[in-house]
Amino acid sequence: MGKLVIHNIGLLLSGKMEQPILDADCIRCEDGKIVQIGKAADVDRAGADTVIDAMGVTLAPGLIDSHIHPVIGDYTPRQQQLSWIDSTLNGGVTTLISAGEVHLPGRPKDIVGLKALAIASQRWYDNFRPSGVKVHAGAPVIEHGLEEHDFKEMADAGVKLLGEVGLGTVKDGPTAKKMVDWARKYGMQSTIHTGGPSIPGSGLIDADVVLEAGTDVVGHINGGHSALPDDQIVCICESCQAGLEIVHNGNERAALLTLNTARELKQLERVILGTDGPAGSGVQPLGILRMIAMLSSLGNVPAEIAFCFGTGNTARQRELDTGLIEVGYCADFVLMDQAQHAPGKTILESVQLGNLPGVGMTIIDGVVTSRRSRNTPPAGAIPLIEGE
């Protein structure tokens, strides 16, 4: 991966709500990690293997989708679509997190089979990154019959996630809590389905079950697809400290209710973003960007803060080494600019007016993984790799 220098950055978004904009215009990375952030005159740029002239565009951490349902490789049988992950990369997303590999035809629900699927899913996405995208997968859907030793076995094999609690046979609070506690004991992070049924076999998971289960993340609190009643959404926000995951494939009104409630609680750092795709609503390559623009414009959130929902907030909630512009973090970036002819004086103003930016380049572990996006509106300016 060598040494990468990106200079002439017009706006540097950090992913940190406490300081969303950094006073810097240059980043140095070595062996896939950020090693220096500052003004170009102060950054060691000598001997770089790759130098990128950002051409005055905005650099942000690569976006993170906190809620996807992958199957295998870059293919989803749910929509019979190839290269959906590559298409998502063209929306600025560099990291995907599985909420369960539930769309696999014939998905095993016996204990031996579900453990085998979780371990295999973790392995194949660890060994293969579609278009360079980091896919955190191997998220078993819990079923009746699992015992503590099963969670230890999966954790020892590298499984770090639970699929959405409630998509399997376990739908009651006491059983869910017992298994979530076992998972947490062995270092596995948990998410719970929230709202009405989404696929055959799932069911209503209401506020009582969500709160009793005590998962780390309240999955699609705005429904996937059907949201809970308003009073239950507010109750969940007020009664726990879990991540509040808002998804593209949910109820937009409930999304804004969640946002406003978190703001009233002074806990916007709990808000994280996902798409909940592939699903019946299809694949959403621009889903995270669309959620950022929607929450910023309709939720009256400064765009630089809304970008934190899809980067640093998720990184901190999910304990990732990406999603923040900080020394030691992975060199995963999206470079973007205000879309051509979009209203607004700056990219941030344009996003807060509800417009999508244009993605000009993505970088993962210090390596350029895509150039001008084929999915976003065309950016005003495009970064250049010097020497090409």
Image (tube, rainbow, N blue to C red):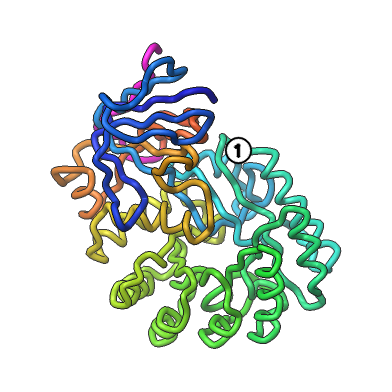
Could you say which quadrant of the image residue 231 lies in?
A: bottom left
Structural crowding at the residue carrying mark 1, measured as other residues with C-alpha within 10 Å and reported as few (<14), some (14–19) or many (≥20): some
- Residue furthest toward the top? 387
- Name the residue rendered at 30%, 72% in the picture: 263
x, y percentage for residue 336? 32, 37
Say above or below: 294 vs 359.
below
Q: Residue at x 36, y 16 (%)?
A: 386
Is residue 117 something that shows in the picture?
yes
In the rendered structure, which segment of residues is drawn in magenta?
A: 375-388
- Farthest left residue? 345
Pick the quarter of the image with the C terminus: top left
Question: Regarding mark 1 in the picture, which secondary structure is present there?
Answer: helix
Picture residue at 20% right of the left edge, 54% below the top: 353
Q: Which residue is mark 1?
A: 130
The residue at 42%/58% (across/down) is 313
Magenta-colored segment: predominant secondary structure: loop
Left or right of residue 263: residue 149? right
Identify which amino acid the numbered label 1 is placed on.
Answer: Pro
- The residue lying toward the viewer, choosing from 152 and 78, is 152
Residue 289: % across, % down: 37, 50
Between residue 384 and residue 205, name the one nearer to us: 384
Q: Nearer the viewer, residue 108 or 305?
A: 305
Question: Looking at the picture, does residue 236 appear above or below residue 224?
Answer: below
Residue 277 drawn at (x, y percent): 54, 57
**Place of residue 356 in the rendered image (x, y in percent of width and height, measured from the top left):** 30, 47
Nearest to the observer: residue 37 or residue 225: 37
